[in-house]
Image: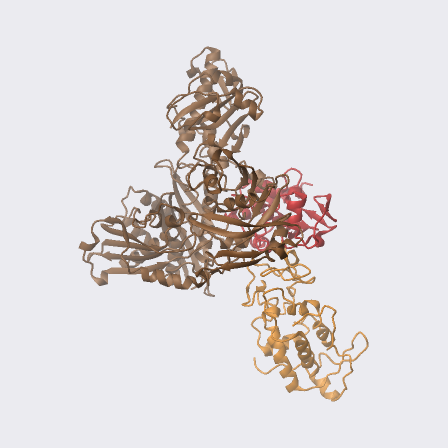
Chain colours: A orange, B brown, C red
Amino acid sequence: MKYHSKNKLHFLPKRTFIVIGALLLAVGLMSFGLTRKHDGEKITVVKDSIGSVAAFKQVYKVLQSPRCMNCHPSGDIPLQGDDSHLHTMSPHRGPDGMGMYAMKCSNCHQPTNTPGLHTPPGNPKWHLPPADMKMVFQGRTAHQLAKQIMDPNRNGHKNMQQLIAHASDTLVKSGWHPGEGRTLPPMSYAAFKKAWITWLTKGAYAPPGK
Amino acid sequence: MAIEQISRRSFIKTTGTAGLALWLGLSAKGSTRKTTNIATAKNFSPFILVEYNGSITIYNIKPEIGQGTFQSVPAVIAEEFEVSLNQVTIKNTSGEPEFGNGQSAGGSSSIRNGYNEYRKIGAAARIVFIAAAAGRWQVSPDNCYAENGKVFNKATNQSFTYSELVEDAAKINLPKEPKLKDPKDFKIIGKMSHRPDIPLKTCGKAQFGIDVQVPGMVYASVERCPVLGGILKSFDASEALKMPGVLKVVKAERIIGNYRYTGVAVIANSFWATLQARKKLKIDWDYDGYDNFNSEDYEEHLRKLADEDGLVDKNIGDITKVNVSPQNSVEAFYETPVVAHSPMEPMNAVARVQGDKLEIWTSTQVPGSIMGTGANALPRSTGFLPENVKMHNMFVGGGFGRRLSVDYIIEAVNIAKQYDKPVKLIWSREDTTQLGPFRPMTFSKLSGGFSDDGKLVTFTHKVISPSLSESRRPDFDKTKVDGSMVEGIGDQDYQIPNIKTSYVRADYHVPIGPWRSVTSSTLSFAHECFIDELAHKAGKDPLDFRMSLLAPDSDTAKIFQKLREVSNWDQPLGNRRGRGVGQWKFFAGQCAQAVEVTHKADGTIKVDKVYAVIDLGVAVNPDNVANQTEGAVVMALTAATKPAITWKQGKVMQHNFYDNTMIRINEVPEVEVHILTGEGKIKGVGEPGLPPFAPALANAIFAATRKRIRKMPFELKA
Amino acid sequence: MITLNINQKDYQVDADPDMPLLWAIRDIVGLTGTKFGCGVAQCGACVVHLNGEAVRSCVTKVGRAAGQKIVTIEGLSQNNDHPLQVAWNEENVPQCGYCHSGQIMSAAVLLRENSNPTDEDIDMAMSGNICRCGTYLRIRKAIHLAAEMQRKVSSSK
């Protein structure tokens, strides 16, 4: 999987979805309703619970991969490596997710990956979710995680449009550019983004379960 | 040893010091003689230099590797000489022949072996200066006293500084057996003092070997066979030579103990450039079969060797004549790992070769042997005459036994021979982790038997391991027990009527070497955990059981008594908590520890507190003793619970601090150190804090969880 | 040529912008108080302040530091008298001393941001710095002492 730094966002919904079943939509997606993209385009949700759940199962595999989960830990210390062990030097999240004191993320994590095996991967925005919005992936079932992502009180106050945009976030994308020796998420970035948007635009259904 | 003095004008000229100076030191020959040429003063070790211009220098012949000799050695001399450490200049020696062959740091011996000699030289110097002043005043020396670098006339309160007395003092013979101070009058020894090297270490001014910069210097690093033991067949440096800053690529031989390895060195104008270019080397290695080597297979091999009788070390009583019924006997097998020393300062040396002359700047524990004349000493192994070698030993960024080996210095010299500028060789952290020498593993087979009335009557400890001496000494004799591999196991104070200790040597191709507290660091684990197993079998409290085996006036009993008191041993601990004890008596000294742990609800073990009692005879700087012992506990905790060094297909599987992990500040227990002084013989400081810890911890975990740990490293989990 | 401002002094450095700052500081500028320990941001021996933050110079490229404000252990105070340096001496913290430039530079950021750190704060700030000699208990003690000294100074102002 190659990382395209030119940000060719093939899967951003450039086309307008057809609005059907507006009533169902209003009931099913009260918290989102119709959202408006900054370029004025409308995101249209076509409810399809089977298609949505199927897409989320793909999404979930990625979110549970070390490349995503390691920075969405259940505790306040990030995880490391393909086995998602606790970060060996125990950096703490800190209130803003940028680390604490002498252990701020960017003290080691540079704007770009450091060359070599076992060196800090890099990104200009490297951080954890903030302390008041931990957005934990670790240990979450697919059901829990889908619900969490759709809950603005637990997803960083993101609406549908912002959730869609989040797939293009530089830090999210850096999961597919993890530095030497680290495994990639279980599907391509393009496939992930497609599944993400499919899940959202087909009604953001959570897979059944607890 | 007797005392000798040197008064020498010609030497002073060459050192650029103004005026007359007096060297005072020890002679190995037992004579007090005078000479005008220090270079020809054989077997003479000067420790004090008093110059006419007012300066007083005390020479520390024990490399400062963190253990505090930069203060402790001069402190003992200064105490008797009646100078304060603030008014003297302290200089580390660098293997100069005139400073003798005691120039090494190892075996916790700096004070243990040197204390009485340092006192003697300080006292002799004081007596001479007092006599000199008495002569000037025409009074009896009894009417004078020395203090703060001056001699005072008791009657008139007049004084001379030592410097003012140099010329007179040079004419007075040193007493052979100088009268030492009464310890109750000590002003420095036994008091908390600040170490004079510490201010240099808080502002970046302390120069370690890696910090040395020599004009014109270039850098080198070496690509070595990833399979230890592999042989260099050929290499292609064409791509590496195209890299920016690269100057030359050469072969580099490293000699370590009885092993020789050849790697490929990149010489460049920065260390970073050497690292980049190393990746571009194309090297053809012959693994020579060593790529079949796996730690797991080797461990299995050691387990099988445990069935062999081995060579007998100690045989007390007669184990074969005692009948112990099976229900009264206990057997156990213990395993320990290979570990690396991992000092924070990676291996490094600067070498400058000019014709047949060699100059070295480095950090080593053994400047004496670098300058020595022996077969294993650096001059001979690199082809230089000892008198053509000059070295500068810097502050040492951690030794722990790693810098008893001079392989990295030999390697630097061999590279520098092939380049016309001084070369600074630096090992990467990966090099420093993977190339050895390593602490060897020891496996232990133990048994103990009780009589029908409950007395421990038999005890055996068989060690199965590779041999340190075989790895390091060319004259090793396989038919004899390598004493360093059975270190301490036959020498504990426990009185058991029938004891047999033995050793089964295993072939090994990995270079091994002493690691802080040497083999005691692994054997104590097996030995003292097994004593706990015996206590459990006997249904006794582990400390009571140990005391029942000890003569009340033994050092171990005294140490345990103190430990019992300071650790509140007899106060029960709360639920899910446990307490364990361990001790070890060996060449370096003696310490006992009690460890308290909590078995947390999530299954993890928290090491709460460690009580250490170290038996010393004398503590020159008690606060430094405490620091050393606290550090020993931390190092022992790393060795007991963090991953070991392992091999797969001939390659070391650990690389850097991410997989060769160390205890960090968030993992340290509280440590309380108590020092026993005042009587008994002088014992060492640096190492004795390690061996008791791992068994005390494992025994504490047993007390808290009933889970017996017989293999290191172990996880803090139950 | 890259300009590095180290301890309030500009240095013109002829180096590849990808070279780690550590080697520029040590081998080119010649300030050797900052140490090489691991080369992969694991041990903290190489910590310097970059615009006040405790960055690891072994993975910080010279290019990132160009024109920025760099402070090394040599520039932490004029006379070895930063409260941490005083406390380090008072508590006899170092043994071999090799890691302590980095330890002190890390602790300095902690003290700037938290004038009264708890043991837990100290662990959070200092768990990136390895000391093989094991002086951690003294590091903790010295940070408490330095914090106390610093508070006394600021309350008397």
Q: List the single residue furthest toward the bottom.
A: A21
- Residue B581 position within the rendered picture, expressed as x and y whole percent measured from the top left: 37, 52
Nearest the viewer among A131 and B389 is B389
In the displayed structure, B159 sits above or below A39; it is above
On the question of residue B64 being in view, the answer is yes
Q: Is residue B456 left or right of residue B224?
A: left
In the displayed structure, B177 sits above or below B315; it is above
Q: Is residue B151 left or right of residue A58?
A: left
In the displayed structure, B607 sits above or below B4; it is below
Is the C terminus of chain B in the top left, top right, bottom left or bottom right quadrant? bottom left
Q: Is residue A53 left or right of residue B471?
A: right
- Residue B316 position within the rendered picture, expressed as x and y whole percent measured from the top left: 23, 48
Q: Quadrant of residue C10?
A: top right
**Count of all numbered marks drawn on residues in the image:** 0
Is the N terminus of chain B in the top left, top right, bottom left or bottom right quadrant? top left
Seen at 43% across and 60% down, the residue is B714
Q: Quadrant of residue B422?
A: top right
Q: Is residue B717 left or right of residue A132?
A: left
In the displayed structure, A124 sits above or below A176; it is above
Nearest the viewer among C122 and B45 is B45
- Residue B666 position within the rendered picture, expressed as x and y whole percent measured from the top left: 53, 55
On the question of residue B187 being in view, the answer is no
Q: List the single residue furthest toward the top.
A: B138
- Residue B639 position within the rendered picture, expressed as x and y whole percent measured from the top left: 45, 54
Q: Quadrant of residue B715?
A: bottom left
